[in-house]
Image (cartoon, coloured by chain):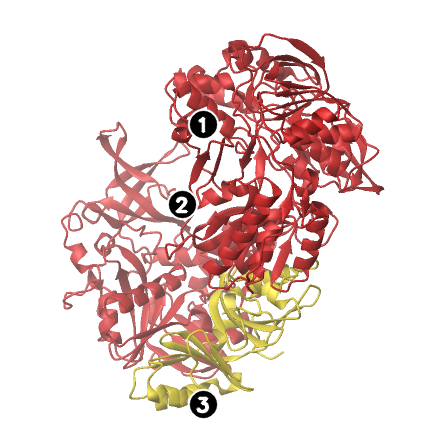
Chain colours: A red, B yellow
Amino acid sequence: MSTRLATQGRLVNRDKAVRFSFNSAPMTGFEGDTLASALLANDQMLVGRSFKYHRPRGIVAAGPEEPNALVNLGVEGKFEPNQRATTTELFEGLLATSQNHWPSLEFDVGAINAKLARFMPAGFYYKMFIHPRPLWKHVYEPFIRQAAGLGQAPKGRDWDTYEHLYAFCDVLVVGGGIAGLQAAKSAAQSGAQVLVLEQTAHWGGRAPVDGGTVDGKPVDKFVEELVSELSDTPNVTLRPRTMGAGVYDHGYVLGYERLTDHAPGMDGPRHRLWRIRAGHIITATGAIERPLSFAGNDIPGVMLAASVRDYAINYGVSAGDRTIVVTNNDDAYRTALALKNVGLEVPAILDARVLPVDSPLMADAKAAGIRVMMGHGIAKVQGSKRVTGVAVCSQAGEGATVEEIACDVVAMSGGWSPVVHLWSHCGGKLLWDTDWAMFRPDVDKAPLGADGSPFVSPAGSANGHFGLTEILGDAHAMGRAAARAIGFTPKKTNAPDGSCLDEAPMAPVWLMPQGAGRDLRGKAWLDYQNDVKVSDVQLAAQEGFESVEHAKRYTTLGMATDQGKLSNINGLAILSDALNQPIPQTGTTTFRPPYTPISMGAIGGEARGEVFQPIRRTPMHDWHDANGADWEPVGHWRRPYAYLRDGESVHDAVMRETKNVRENLGLLDASTLGKLIVKGPDAGRFLDMLYTNMMSTLKPGKCRYGLMCGENGFLIDDGVVARIDDNTFLCHTTTGGAERIHAHMEEWLQTEWWDWQVYVANVTEQYAQVAVVGPKARQALEALGGMDVSRDALGFMEWADGTLGGFDVRAYRISFSGELSYEIAVRASEGQAFWDALMKVGADLGVMPYGTEALHILRAEKGFIMIGDETDGTVIPQDLGLHWALSKKKDDYLGKRAHLRSHMADPARWKLVGLETTDGSTLPDGAYAVAEGTNANGQRNMQGRVTSSYHSPNLNKGIAMGLVLHGPDRMGEVLEFPGTDGTTYKARIVSPVFYDPDGEKQNV
Amino acid sequence: MSKTVTALNGARFADGIADVAELPMQGMITLRGDLGMAALKKAVKSNTSLVVPDQGQVAQNDAYTVAWMSPDEVLILCPYAEVQAIIAKLDKALIRAHALAVDVSDARAMFQVAGVHARAVMAKLAPVDVSERGFQPGMFRRTRLAQAAAAFWVADADTFHIICFRSQGQYMFDLLCVAAQKGSEVGRF
């Protein structure tokens, strides 16, 4: 039975009961409990089933290293799987359910896998399911996916909000234990700005549990005073509930702050991701206790020794009445003493070591009446869903039972591993410490910054120091050194004087007993979360997976959500043993951020809902929205695809708008088209290089359509250029091209033609631009009144400044539809008013706004190409029959040389033609024209493809453009286009200009 | 209603940890040229009474603001009604020089974030040290706020002014409101 003790519990408030539920059973804990401590207080040791064999699993640890106690938390928009009970603070109304079992936690059908464990060794899936190949996708994978997996995926939309925070500091201390606090103080005394992150809600780490004195005071008192002092220090910021998640280049660190996890009713974001730039980083991340590998070490009730002590002292929770302590070091004796101190039974301490003299802690244990069995260990643990006892054996032997002892808890300690994760993230190296059998940071091989000097320092037990004196001394030195490293002058002070009992050396124990046979090894777990046993790692070594990275992936050791916090060192020690090589030669796997999983919400930050993307809106956006716009994303812009009237389908709206432009008057919001001002004495010369045709000869007041190619000759943009004055041009780009072409211009000006006198400014958003299109366009503008827009005053491909309806305008007489057409630019802030004025004067002229699809159909009827439809990054002007736009007078322009290459000049390049189905139907966009025979891959040969296809309401038939092999020479030929709908479309090759081939309508 | 409207018609949010408000139409002129050129310095001075600021700086008086945008660009803020007149004067003063003065007033939206938590709101969105130590009056940054390009400076003690593209005005406003949401104080600025 685990239960609440009458005494102890320094972190809980016994006056405040907190109700929660686990698997629908109502339970009660105290304010300050973690979910794990509250579960134990309610005698809920069994918390989940293992991943592969569905074995019953209990709480093992008390911190972020916990592998087993993962639960589904909350419901609906608060639901989250795989939440660690040991790091989940209890709150009123918390709902938790266990994971990975069917039908119930107590009775799980999947546990049959455990009986088959012999037949499911490491690599089982690879070996079993590789043949026959097609079965993997259709049979094995769906089956395995059903059986595996921990928590459920959330289905509802997350109700919470999240945010990022950019923070800057001189010294960042990760870890608010006694080392972190001392390092922060020693660094801050120099005047440096210090930020301290602590993943839990409490300061001081393990020190208050482990005891000792500092400067003659009890250590918890020392911590209290230190925290109070640092809180009052203006250049120190303390952040509890904030985990240092990852260390990256240039002193960049991610911190993960859990703001409302402990109080979900609070206002504000749930998590905050700190994006920190630090001058120097101190990793005071502490150490994690290692399990021991003995048979049955995964049975609920087997726990880490220090965690058993944490539950007793921090939360006043006993994991059980009778605790067997099994250890290879002195620290576990503290657990035995702590339990004895609260009146619980400790039948024996099984110490794998044989010490010549009793260490002080051992002497204390013996004095407290605890039986110490040196040279002994556990042969196997008895029990299934709960420990009932242990079979004791000699550590040196093969596991013959010398005695059975009844107990309900086994507190194990295999030694301690410094948390070197953050030190290692950015390249900090490790060295093997033989005295403590652990990897510790190699301070001479620290992560290096841009200037080649170290930017991370470890401190305290994270640096391999144990014992208060050593920890405080190291932290003090590291804090001062960090300040000095970034140019501050640390104060000359001494480290506080810590004192605790001396410990005898530990003895490395990687397998218990050391000669354990196959049966025992097959039940000795290394990785609880992924069900990896000692025998699996040995098998991997035997099968040739000698690199630790290979063995890891083959066995899945350390690949679960806990990333092997408990299993890595034990696993690689077993691997080293199997390979007969020293542990440092095997090395570790790579430590990668985050330290423990962080929420997807925190990573996304504020970017969700309305602010998921920076949507760009034209000045008339709201009008469009209120008038039935069916939106189409174009880059980050939203443009109306069509304006739907009541009861109208999108297709009907498009047809109506397209017809109306040819018959009456259409308005298009063309504000999104890019507008770049290019000015300077060399502007003409510059544009001659950028466009394939000649721009320098353009007269002020005139417009010219231009094509732009990249260096490799492929079309990248097109648009109308207007010459404003001798020195100034205004270049229109495509909607998606404004920023890209602006950057393209700047790049050439800054890198290649840096001595040319040209300035470019992107004024796209300065103007609202409205295309006024259709036979009644001129009437509409004349109704507004103002400047002369007659054929003589403003001819085709001319522009003029003036006023219309009282608005200052620049009117361009350009047409992308083949109709009489003006594009009128006004100030963006007057765009809506101008649009309203046009709608008003247009009312009698049959005005309708039209969207991008009508725009597309209108241009396709005229055979005008569209960048992005007829071009896809592989198309050159020659492919589109645009030879007329390739200047022969110019020595050079971007793309000219590329066009001379043999592949570009190849007559077999597919060329633009019009396509007209034989039955008037509409060709599927993107369809391919098939040719005779097959290619080397056995695929049907192709001879062309559709680049644009529409139903034209004006011609009342399907029209299309496409690129076809020798297309222009094959007029009248019929091609076959198999569609994805099973039918084959037949289309005749025709001229791409379907409507008004002589251009009479736009010249009126 | 006037025919001239800002991107959000003066939207405002006062329910959070800082006040967010769209500012009225603001005259803005992009001036590109050699910033070391005497004629340019003189032209800026005579039109705004301000000296061309150094890199990362902004110069301000009651009517005008001049911000350093790049090694060959400054942004001049002036009353909206004065824009055309100032551009004409700049063009005239720089007629013999290679320079570009262009009206970008309508291409922008401008916001104000004010209050004791204004720095915290900015720190959630801009990868800039906006602490009192890191970002003081007189400094100017072209950067991004979340996913949108932006520039900002401290107008006075607790007030930031932000410029972004007009088309992203709604995004910027929504963003600032999210960052200023109730209960999201940081307690570090």
Q: Disc 3 or disc 2, which is closer to the eye?
A: 2
User: Pointer 3 indicates a residue of which chain?
Assistant: B
SS type, badge 3: helix
Which numbered disc, 1 or 2, marks the residue that appears first in the sequence?
A: 2
Q: Is A494 in front, or is B180?
A: A494
Q: Residue at x 26, y 27 (%)?
A: A938
**A862 left or right, relative to B120:** left
Q: Is A328 in front, or is A897?
A: A328
Q: Amino acid at mark 1?
A: Lys
Callouts 3 and 1 in the same chain = no
Residue A552's disc is 1
Residue A527's disc is none
Residue A445's disc is 2
The quarter holding residue A736 reads bottom left
SS type, badge 2: loop
Q: CA distance from mark 1 to mark 2?
A: 25 Å
User: Pointer 1 indicates a residue of which chain?
Assistant: A
Q: CA distance from mark 3 to mark 1?
A: 70 Å
Q: Position of residue A242 (x, y in %)?
A: 62, 49
Mark 1 crowd level (few <14, some 14–19, many ≥20, 10 Å Cα) = many
Q: Position of residue B36 (x, y in %)?
A: 34, 83
- Give the quarter of the figure containing the C terminus of chain B: bottom right
**A32 left or right, relative to A608:** right
User: Pointer 2 indicates a residue of which chain?
Assistant: A
